[in-house]
Image (spheres, grey):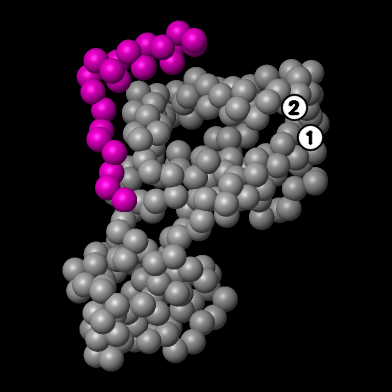
Amino acid sequence: MNDKFQGNMQKYLVDGGSLPREPIPSSVTGRLPTLTELENYALEQWECFLLQLINSSQVERGTSFSSSMMKTFQRGLLSSRDGDAPKLSENGFQFLLMETNVQLWYIMREYISSAEERGVDPTELISFLLELSFHTLGAAYSFNTLTDVQRIAIRDLAELGLVKVQQGIVVVETNFRLYAYSASRLHCEILRLFSRVEYQLPNLIVGAITKESLYGAFDNGITAEQIISFLKQNAHPA
């Protein structure tokens, strides 16, 4: 085990870490991806990651990886000469021959080991990764309670397919008009559970919270507290 990782793990176990967060109730989230859909998503993301290692030109522009993940890749997997783009190294090719679980462990070990180089406290990172291991597979958790370090970690893990991020920003006016800045079909369907969706643009959902839509939500077992909780979790920052 890496000495730095071992030391930080010991510090976490001695000092204690955060308890796992509570998942968002299903009555608030609506339909979530099934375990099969999550598995397919993970496989697609992992394949994208492996293609990035082999040849970045084979990966669509919209799926390029963050700078923090690229630094992790370059630690032994990629090599480059002055002025040349990084290419797969001998160790990188050996990495491709490993089983997926071994590949994942290698990447996570390097990700933690390079934390300080990225200006991240490795103890906080390890604490958060351990916390995630106690979360329920397939459940939804709020993004708004995370620290900056945790948000970056979630983004990086999502690029590898280890977590799936689904979020949108919702603005509710005093006249109960509703604007959700999201391209997610799931987000739109969640809003339909308690509001009247009037139209949907590529990145904007427009609707209203009406007496009829609320009565319909209440009839389906959704409470006012759950609706308020959902709106707070997805509220536009003031």
Q: Is 154 left or right of 145, judged from the image as shown?
A: right
Residue depicted at x 75% and y 40%: 51
Q: Which residues are magenta?
A: 1-23
Label 1: few (<14), some (14–19) or many (≥20) C-alpha neighbours in 10 Å: many
Work out whether mark 2 precedes mark 1 in sequence or the reverse, and give the earlier one: 1
Q: Which residue is mark 1?
A: 54
- State whether residue 129 appears in this view: yes
The x, y position of residue 17, in whole percent, is 26, 28
Residue depicted at x 32% and y 42%: 147
Q: Which quadrant holds the C terminus?
A: bottom left
Label 2: which secondary element: helix
Are the residues flagged by discs 2 and 1 in contact, CB closer than 8 Å?
yes
Q: Is 146 left or right of 51, judged from the image as shown?
A: left
Mark whose residue sits in front, 2 or 1: 2
The x, y position of residue 128, in whole percent, is 36, 33
The x, y position of residue 137, in whole percent, is 43, 44
Residue type at tag 2: Leu
Mark 2 to mark 1 CA distance (whole Å): 9 Å
Q: Is residue 156 magenta?
A: no
- State whether residue 159 appears in this view: no
Residue depicted at x 42% and y 85%: 197
Picture quadrant where residue 29 is located:
bottom left
Compared to 232, does 81 lie above or below?
A: above
Residue type at tag 1: Ile
Compared to 206, does 151 lie above or below?
A: above
The x, y position of residue 228, in whole percent, is 23, 70
Residue 96 circle label = 2
